[in-house]
């Protein structure tokens, strides 16, 4: 096993992980950052749209520009980055960690403190042939077109009219793909009106109370059959419609990626408002396992700005434990971040999250 | 799938051209892109066969989370080709079943 000179391991270099690194390095703490993607930034690297949210958290800035800004906050001398590398296991009580370095060889390290900032993964829904090649998650579609410059399909059916479905539909048009139809199972569009009106103006037909019944094709997608739903979400017979498409994009929500926390023995809790099963954590972002912290989408699907604050909170709380900053200075910074987080969640779209956090706080594993 | 030629916001700089082999067929691609990205442009959408149902499987998440894109790369099975970058001369094969690990 390697004897390491790192104080903290941060797993995941999205907005949560990068902000954790920024706070840690500001306190003079040496960090190892491991990310399995080829570049840092997590989901931000493919988000070409200008961010919503508050100005102090980069609203109005394009997602793709944020990772560089965050990296400027990090002291290069204090951070070591392993990109294209995956953390595959955490073994308490000494927090031994297995890292699949460069997707080629396994290394073993040990850390007193770990921050899990592994993000979320996309949901799948049930319909016939849902495993056919040509059915992609919305994140995959974004990765292909915005990160690698590939048009993911010629004619697409978009499933799901939340913010992600709306934004990705617009981005598809920018890339030169035709979105033939956008369907949504709920009776109304879930995302912001600004995004919805933009794509309706661009001529994409939007059908609510409609779901996908079947993908057509044997080797890959050649079409789809949609069906209307009644007010009880039951399929209405005779409303099936066939549509000719070569790609189907599912934008039906995300679920926290917290496998590593489970592996480490962190207690879990089911909170629908935060994305389903999540590892329990306290307001310092610490899980039920000593020294293991969690931040961002990995502990509740929310948004980039809240992921950033949670990452900062995790970093600051570790700095406090390590006594690298006076307790007073630490507490002040922690309070500032907690206030920002409350402010972020105070709008109508934050109600669900606030309810989820309330349930989380009602339980203790300390 | 085609490459984007004009984009209102993004500029896609092309790196050095390299070649990988897929099932013995030579595929031209660019350094810096993933194996799946190179295969997609070449029109290859079936990446492996489902272990149980033997149905064709393609890309789904593109960020290493779902295992839908596992392939055999340079003789090593179960490589997540959506997060591994192409290297000149790489050999890529469709994976049928769970794959065999060769000792070396
Ligand atoms: C289409 C779309 C539009 C969005 N628009 C907005 C918006 O306008 N405003 C906003 O605030 N938010 C927006 N979001 C949400 C925002 O992108 C996410 O909430 C945010 O990226 C979460 O940050 P994170 O750091 O928790 O996770 P991520 O950004 O997902 O980063 C996780 C990182 O962890 C790495 N990782 C995972 N597992 C491992 C492992 N085992 N080992 C090593 N590395 C690992 C991954 O490679 C990844 O880089 C949008 C999301 C999408 C998909
Ligand atoms: S497509 Fe999901 S892991 Fe590669």
Image (cartoon, coloured by chain):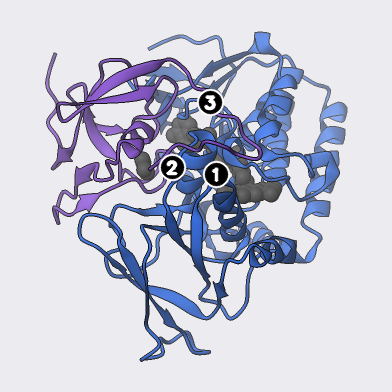
Chain colours: A blue, B purple
Chain that bears disc 3: A
- Judge by depth and name the residue closer to the eye, A6 or B75: B75
| Residue at position x 73%, y 46% in the image | A51
Give the class, few, some or many, for how many residues have Cα within 10 Å of label 3's Cα (few <14, many ≥20).
Answer: few
Q: CA distance from mark 3 to mark 1?
A: 31 Å
Nearest to N terminus: mark 2 or mark 3: 3
Residue A265 is marked as: 2
Q: Does any portion of residue A184 appear in the rendered image?
A: yes
Residue A288 is marked as: 1
- The image position of residue A165, as x and y in percent, is 56, 59
Give the left or right position of residue B65, taking residue A202 as reference.
left
| Residue at position x 61%, y 38% in the image | A44
Judge if badges 2 and 3 mark residues of a common chain: yes
Q: Are marks 1 and 2 in contact (CB under 8 Å)?
A: yes
Nearest to N terminus: mark 1 or mark 2: 2
Give the left or right position of residue A73, taking residue A20 as reference.
right
Residue A39 is marked as: 3
Q: Are marks 2 and 3 in contact (CB under 8 Å)?
A: no
Give the left or right position of residue A364, taking residue B3 as reference.
right
**Is ligand 1 closer than 8 angstroms to the Cβ of mark 3?**
no
- Judge by depth and name the residue closer to the eye, A92 or A222: A222
Chain that bears disc 2: A
Q: CA distance from mark 1 to mark 2?
A: 8 Å
- The residue lying furthest to the front in this view is B5
Q: Quadrant of ligand 1?
A: top right
Give the left or right position of residue A168, taking residue B47 as reference.
right
- The image position of residue A43, as x and y in percent, is 57, 40
Chain that bears disc 1: A
């Amino acid at each position: 096993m390697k004897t390491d000179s790192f104080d903290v391991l941060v797993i995941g270099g999205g907005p949560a992980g990068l902000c954790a690194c920024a706070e840690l390095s500001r306190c003079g703490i040496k960090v190892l950052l491991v990310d399995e993607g080829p570049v840092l930034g997590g989901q931000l690297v493919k988000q070409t749209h200008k961010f919503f949210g508050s100005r102090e958290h980069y609203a109005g800035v394009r997602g793709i520009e944020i990772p560089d800004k965050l990296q400027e906050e990090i002291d290069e001398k204090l951070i070591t980055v392993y990109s294209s590398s995956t953390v595959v296991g955490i073994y308490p009580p000494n927090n031994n960690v297995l890292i699949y370095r460069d997707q080629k060889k396994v290394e073993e390290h040990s850390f007193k403190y770990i921050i899990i900032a592994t993000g979320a993964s996309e949901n799948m829904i049930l319909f016939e042939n849902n495993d056919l090649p040509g059915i992609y998650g919305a994140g995959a579609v974004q990765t292909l077109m915005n990160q690698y410059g590939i048009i993911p399909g010629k004619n697409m059916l978009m499933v799901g009219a939340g913010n992600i479905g709306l934004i990705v539909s617009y981005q598809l048009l920018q890339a030169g793909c035709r979105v033939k139809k956008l369907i949504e199972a709920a009776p109304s569009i879930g995302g912001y009106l600004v995004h919805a009106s933009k794509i309706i103006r661009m001529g994409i037909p939007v059908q609510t109370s409609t779901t996908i019944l079947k993908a057509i094709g044997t080797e890959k997608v050649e079409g789809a059959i949609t069906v209307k739903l009644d007010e009880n979400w039951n399929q209405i017979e005779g409303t099936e419609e066939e549509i000719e498409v070569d790609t189907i994009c599912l934008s039906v929500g995300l679920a926290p990626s917290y496998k590593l926390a489970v592996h480490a023995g962190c207690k879990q809790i089911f909170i629908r408002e935060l994305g389903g099963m999540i590892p329990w954590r306290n307001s310092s972002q610490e899980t039920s396992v000593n020294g293991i912290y969690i931040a961002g989408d990995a502990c509740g699907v929310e948004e980039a700005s809240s992921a950033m604050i949670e990452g900062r909170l995790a970093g600051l709380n570790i700095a406090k434990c390590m006594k690298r900053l006076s307790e007073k200075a630490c507490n002040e910074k922690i309070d500032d971040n907690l206030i920002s987080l409350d402010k972020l969640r105070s709008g109508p779209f934050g109600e669900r999250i606030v309810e989820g956090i309330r349930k989380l706080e009602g339980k203790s594993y300390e | 799938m085609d490459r984007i030629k004009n984009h209102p916001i993004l500029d896609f700089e092309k790196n050095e051209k390299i070649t990988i082999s897929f099932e013995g067929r030579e595929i031209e691609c660019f350094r810096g892109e993933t194996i799946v990205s190179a295969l997609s442009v070449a029109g290859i959408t079936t990446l492996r066969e489902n272990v149980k149902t033997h149905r064709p499987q393609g890309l789904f998440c593109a960020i290493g989370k779902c295992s839908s894109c596992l392939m055999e790369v340079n003789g090593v099975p179960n490589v997540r080709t959506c997060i591994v970058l192409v290297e000149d001369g790489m050999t890529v094969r469709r994976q049928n079943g769970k794959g065999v690990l060769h000792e070396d």
